[in-house]
Each structure stands twice: as C-alpha cells, then as structure tokens.
Image: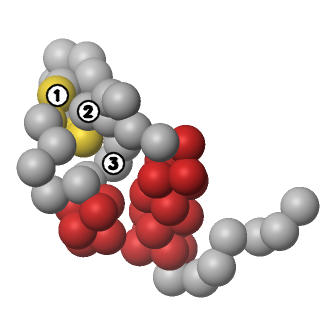
Amino acid sequence: MKVTKSSEAILPDAPRELPYEGAKPMILVEDVQPTVVKDIVVSIWVDLYGKKVPQE
C-alpha cells in the first residue's frame, strides 16, 4: 500500500517492499484483518484527496 502519514500511523512497523524496479517503497500488508485494510485504504484516500470516500 502507498506510504502516507495515515498509513504509517496505522502500521508503523510494517515492512517496506519495492513492488517493481524503479518504484517507491510500499507498505507490505500481510496477515491483517480486513477491517484494518479498509481503514488503511480510507485513510490513504483522505491523505491523497483531502475528502471522505464516496459512498456506493
């Protein structure tokens, strides 16, 4: 997952991996509850776009 202030706050000790050559390091998410993954995705959205995630 993309490294942002919020994603680092939620998973501060998660390892970083390069998804492909030339890429920036990303947070490697393993063995995490689905609700935590959702929280990370929502927090990244807010960090990038500065607004709440649109509802379906």
Quadrant location of the C terminus? bottom right
Seen in the picture, residue 29 relative to 8 is either above or below; the reply is: above
Q: Which residue is mark 1?
A: 17
Give the image location of residue 48, x and y in percent.
45, 69
Looking at marks 3 and 1 on the same chain, the residue that comes earlier in the sequence is marked by 3
Name, please, the residue furthest toward the top. Answer: 21
Give the image location of residue 8, x and y in percent.
21, 61
Q: Which residue is mark 2?
A: 28
Label 2: how many residues lie within 10 Å, few (<14), some (14-19) or many (20+)? Answer: some
From the viewer's perspective, tell me whether residue 54 is left or right of residue 26: right
Whether label 1 touches label 2, CB < 8 Å = yes
Label 3: how many residues lie within 10 Å, few (<14), some (14-19) or many (20+)? Answer: some
Label 1: how many residues lie within 10 Å, few (<14), some (14-19) or many (20+)? Answer: some
Kindly indicate the quadrant of the structure image that contains residue 47.
bottom left
Q: Amino acid at mark 3?
A: Lys
Looking at marks 2 and 3 on the same chain, the residue that comes earlier in the sequence is marked by 3
Whether label 2 touches label 3, CB < 8 Å = no
Q: Residue at x 55, y 52 (%)?
A: 35
Q: Amino acid at mark 2?
A: Leu
From the viewer's perspective, tell me whether residue 54 is left or right of residue 2: right
Q: CA distance from mark 3 to mark 1?
A: 11 Å
Image coloring type: secondary structure
Give the image location of residue 39, x and y in percent.
50, 61
Q: Residue at x 31, y 70 (%)?
A: 6
Q: Which residue is mark 3?
A: 2
Q: Residue at x 10, y 49 (%)?
A: 13
